[in-house]
Image (cartoon, rainbow, N blue to C red):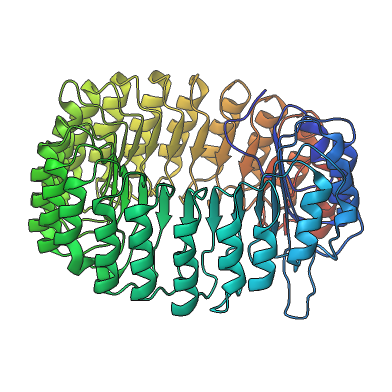
């Protein structure tokens, strides 16, 4: 059996049941759990990724690291601390190179471990095959960062959230002399004007570095000029992140000028207030640029005037594939300008316009523009597009030949009429596989439209309907849909005002369903009646691997029904039951059921009024973290 998502394993006995999983994650890990994981690895388990975050210093972290050498396919190892202090205390304890035997690991994370650069370099040398090193949050200074840059053979290095500061001459020197590193991340390293200038000037001497992240530092106009020069003349960089670097309008213009003649950069993030004034120059550069494929202008205070220049770029540029414009003040007129440009564009694949205040008219226009465009991923959440905007989006996915695959219209004041427009598009659409329409007032009527469409649609895989007030009638419609639709894989219905009538209908629909893998029903008013129906479904269902029933009103009777289903189920991996009312009666039933179940690896049933005695029994018996207090 294989699971479609990484599973969080964090208990003593769970590791003996995951031989077929490629990823083993151990967050909030006790000493006993570390030891159990070590024993598991020494069996030669073919784990490809391992992450451990111990709760307190333990000698067993040494045993776990040593056991990693016995896992022949381990490619990624992550060791991080649950907490660390300025005095150097870390739940990982004192890490040394002697703890790390030679092994196959190529990617190493040492996060918030209070590890020094010297020790990290020694670990890389001891392990023998590390090509990527990430040491975020370790109080490494500029000399330490320079030492890491001198490690031979490293291709990627992340030194994020370390206090490099402005005194980075040694870092710049090491960067100029480095001939192996392809990616360097210095995000949030307290680099200021002087330090930014030194590092950016070093770019002109480095011909190997391809990706550089300087986000959340402070770059002066002189540093921006150095970047612009590197972009104009340097053939190396292909990706550059300058988000939140306090660039002034003048500094932004220097970088934009570099883009004009650049022939290598394919990705750039320019999330700064200063870019708003530079939209005319940016548009001119992008119309000329024939290399850039990804552009992020998130949170740049771009208004309608700036959006008109962006629209002009979309009309004339033929290389841009991914455009992110979230969290700007584009407004309705700006949104319409983007739509006009998009109507002439046949290359853009991803358009993110979330939280841009575009309103109904622009929402409608963008929807129509996407009908015949190449856009496959459209993000429009939090834009108040209303029913009119939903009508345009519905027409887009209804259009024959439309290629949309992912659509998010969360939180857009869409009502039943707008939901009907989207549903009409779904009936005919053959490409959309993910639809997020939650946080809208579509109600039970709108839900009925969507559910009816999915009785005919055979392509959608993921549907988010959370917080849509679908109520009892919506639940009934979705239950009927589940009994007939055999392609939907994920259904999210949290905060949907579902009661037991709707919940029972969903449970009955699940019983005959052969496709759904993940069902989220948290934060509703579901009780024992729903749990009985779902329990009956679990006894025969062969596809559902994740079920979330948190924060409902399920009591002991419902928990018994779920337990009966679990006892006969060999597919379910994850069950969320926290904040219900199962008490000791339900806990005892679950404990008995798990004597027969060999697949469940995660059960969260906190805040259920279970006695400490039963909680202790479950904790010592089960294969996961069953916090039942």
Left or right position of 269 against 545: left
Left or right position of 597 against 250: right
Q: Residue visible at 48% across and 56% down?
A: 212
| Residue 451 in the image, given as x and y percentages of width and height | 31, 30
Q: Residue visible at 64% across and 36% down?
A: 562
| Residue 299 in the image, given as x and y percentages of width and height | 30, 64
| Residue 26 in the image, given as x and y percentages of width and height | 74, 49
Specify whether residue 330 is in view.
Answer: no
| Residue 79 in the image, given as x and y percentages of width and height | 74, 54
Quadrant including the C terminus: bottom right
Count of labels in the image: 0
Tell me the quarter of the picture where residue 592 sits. Answer: top right
Tell me the quarter of the picture where residue 603 sits. Answer: top right
Tell me the quarter of the picture where residue 610 sits. Answer: bottom right
* Residue toward you, 294 or 420: 294
Q: Residue visible at 64% across and 59% down?
A: 149
* Residue toward you, 278 or 596: 278
Specify whether residue 89 is in view.
Answer: yes
* Residue toward you, 448 or 8: 8
Quadrant including the N terminus: top right
């Amino acid at each position: 059996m294989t699971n479609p998502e990484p599973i969080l394993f964090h208990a003593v006995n769970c590791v003996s049941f995951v031989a077929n999983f490629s990823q083993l994650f151990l967050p909030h890990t006790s000493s006993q759990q570390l030891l159990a994981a070590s024993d598991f690895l020494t069996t030669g388990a073919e784990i490809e990724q391992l992450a451990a975050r111990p709760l307190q210093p333990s000698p067993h972290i040494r045993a776990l690291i040593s056991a990693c050498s016995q896992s022949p396919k381990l490619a990624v190892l992550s060791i991080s601390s649950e907490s660390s202090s300025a005095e150097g205390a870390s739940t990982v304890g004192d890490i040394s190179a002697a703890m790390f035997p030679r092994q196959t690991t190529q990617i190493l994370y040492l996060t918030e471990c209070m590890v020094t650069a010297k020790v990290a370099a020694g670990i890389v040398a001891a392990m023998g095959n590390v090509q990527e090193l990430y040491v975020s949050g370790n109080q490494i200074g500029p000399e330490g960062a320079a030492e890491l840059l001198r490690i031979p053979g490293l291709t990627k290095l992340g030194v994020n959230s370390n206090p490099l500061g402005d005194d980075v001459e040694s870092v710049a020197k090491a960067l100029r002399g480095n001939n192996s590193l392809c990616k360097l991340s210095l995000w949030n390293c307290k680099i200021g004007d002087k330090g930014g200038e030194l590092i950016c000037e070093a770019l002109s001497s480095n011909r190997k570095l391809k990706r550089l992240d300087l986000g959340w530092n402070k770059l002066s106009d002189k540093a921006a000029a150095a970047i612009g020069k590197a972009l104009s003349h340097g053939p190396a960089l292909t990706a550059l992140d300058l988000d939140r670097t306090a660039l002034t309008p003048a500094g932004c213009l220097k970088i934009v000028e570099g883009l004009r003649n650049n022939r290598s950069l394919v990705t750039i993030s320019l999330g700064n207030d200063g870019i708003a004034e530079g939209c005319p120059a940016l548009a001119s550069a992008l119309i000329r640029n024939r290399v850039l494929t990804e552009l992020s202008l998130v949170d740049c205070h771009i208004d309608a005037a700036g959006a008109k220049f962006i629209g002009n770029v979309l009309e004339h540029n033929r290389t841009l594939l991914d455009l992110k414009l979230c969290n700007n003040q584009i407004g309705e007129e700006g949104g319409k300008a983007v739509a006009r440009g998009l109507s002439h564009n046949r290359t853009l694949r991803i358009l993110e316009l979330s939280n841009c205040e575009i309103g109904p008219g622009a929402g409608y226009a963008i929807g129509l523009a996407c009908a015949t465009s190449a856009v496959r991923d459209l993000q429009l959440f939090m834009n108040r597009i209303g029913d009119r905007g939903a009508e345009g989006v519905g027409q887009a996915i209804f259009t024959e030949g439309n290629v949309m695959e992912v659509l998010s219209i969360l939180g857009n004041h869409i009502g039943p009429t707008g939901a009907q427009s989207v549903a009409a598009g779904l009936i005919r659409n053959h490409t959309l596989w993910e639809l997020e329409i939650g946080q809208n007032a579509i109600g039970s009527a709108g839900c009925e439209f969507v559910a009816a469409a999915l009785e005919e649609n055979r392509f959608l895989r993921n549907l988010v309907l959370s917080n849509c007030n679908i109520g009892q009638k919506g639940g009934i419609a979705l239950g009927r849909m589940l009994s007939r639709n055999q392609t939907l894989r994920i259904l999210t219905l949290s905060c949907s005002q579902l009661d037991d009538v709707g919940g029972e209908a969903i449970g009955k629909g699940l019983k005959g369903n052969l496709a759904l893998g993940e069902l989220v029903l948290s934060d509703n008013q579901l009780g024992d009646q729903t749990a009985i129906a779902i329990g009956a479904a679990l006894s025969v269902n062969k596809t559902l691997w994740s079920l979330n029933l948190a924060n409902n009103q399920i009591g002991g009777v419902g928990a018994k029904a779920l337990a009966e289903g679990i006892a006969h189920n060999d597919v379910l991996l994850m069950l969320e039951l926290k904040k219900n009312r199962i008490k000791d009666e339900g806990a005892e039933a679950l404990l008995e059921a798990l004597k027969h179940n060999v697949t469940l690896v995660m059960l969260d049933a906190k805040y259920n009024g279970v006695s400490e005695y039963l909680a202790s029994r479950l904790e010592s018996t089960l294969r996961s973290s069953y916090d039942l207090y």
